[in-house]
Amino acid sequence: MQTKITGTILPVLQVGLEPGETVIATPGELSWMTASIQMRTTMNTAGSSGLWGAVKRAVTGGGLFMTEFSAAGAQGVVAFAARVPGAILPVEVGPGQSYMIHKHGFLCATMGVQLSTGFQRSLGAGVFGGDGFLLQRLTGPCTAWVELGGEIVSHDLAPGETLRVHPGHVGMFEERVGFDVVMMPGIKNALFGGDGLFLAQLTGPGRVWLQTMTLPNFAHALAPYLGQQQAQTMSEAGIGAGVAGAVLRDIFGRN
């Protein structure tokens, strides 16, 4: 298997497959492929076990189905382009290793990948619309590619070292990193500071990868150039529709 990431702002991953080799992606990720590539859409892949496993994967944003791309009889190429300006990060997931990634971060992986719910916090279902905060758990062994928005800023946290981050900027981290969602310190900061009510708290040891751009921020930047109805639709789509989405957008402070 040969891989190549082309581009900077809107990169594309091209995967060259030998006969019998397979790469797995969520539906809708395909950009182009050669005629020798065969597609197979199924629930029973990426570590899921039947319908229930697929449903649990879908809850994290991974999708109910997965698509396998295989080279049949001859070499072939399949490509996956980034959906938003950002970066595509290759990750070698060894036996016993696991990573937590944001719910839209998984792009594709080799056979052996397993996706499941890694973290789910409702943040007050009924008050905040139940969208809450979701992370996918990525395990292997496999080679995976993760899509992060904007630039990537990585930190190697020492044991006990803590980093507090707006939830939308959490791109990926090693599972050994302690993770929780905490209230913004100080009632005035939470209510009037404009930075939201909640922060993601990451505690070492381990490496974390932060993303400088999120989909809601991207929609917010485009809003002045759209009609009022289009801007409202895009803004809500980034974090949930209706009033609940608007409330959560205010809570997360455009993240």
Image: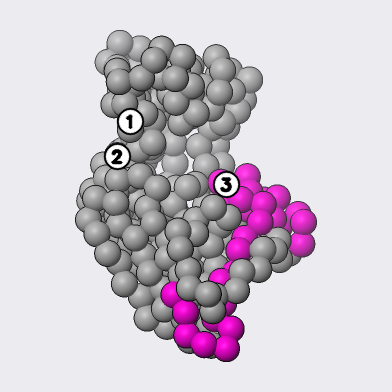
Residue type at mark 1? Asn
Please, is residue 125 above or below residue 168 in the view? above
Q: Who's the residue at 49% across and 56% down the image?
A: 29
Q: Quadrant where the C terminus lies?
A: top left
Other-residue count near label 1 (Cα within 10 Å), few / some / many at <14 / 14–19 / ≥20: some
In this rendering, position of residue 212 left or right of residue 48 = left
The dot on residue 217 is 1
The dot on residue 213 is 2
Other-residue count near label 3 (Cα within 10 Å), few / some / many at <14 / 14–19 / ≥20: many
Q: Which residue is mark 3?
A: 60
Q: Quadrant where the N terminus lies?
A: bottom left
Report x, y in % for residue 39.
61, 69
User: In this picture, which residue range is highlighted in magenta?
Assistant: 50-77
The first of marks 3 and 2 along the sequence is 3
Q: Is residue 217 visible?
A: yes
For the residue labelled by badge 3, is the local secondary structure a helix, a strand or a loop? loop
In this rendering, position of residue 153 left or right of residue 71 = left
Report x, y in % for residue 26.
56, 57
Q: Nearer the viewer, mark 1 or mark 3?
A: 1
CA gap between label 1 and label 3 equals: 20 Å
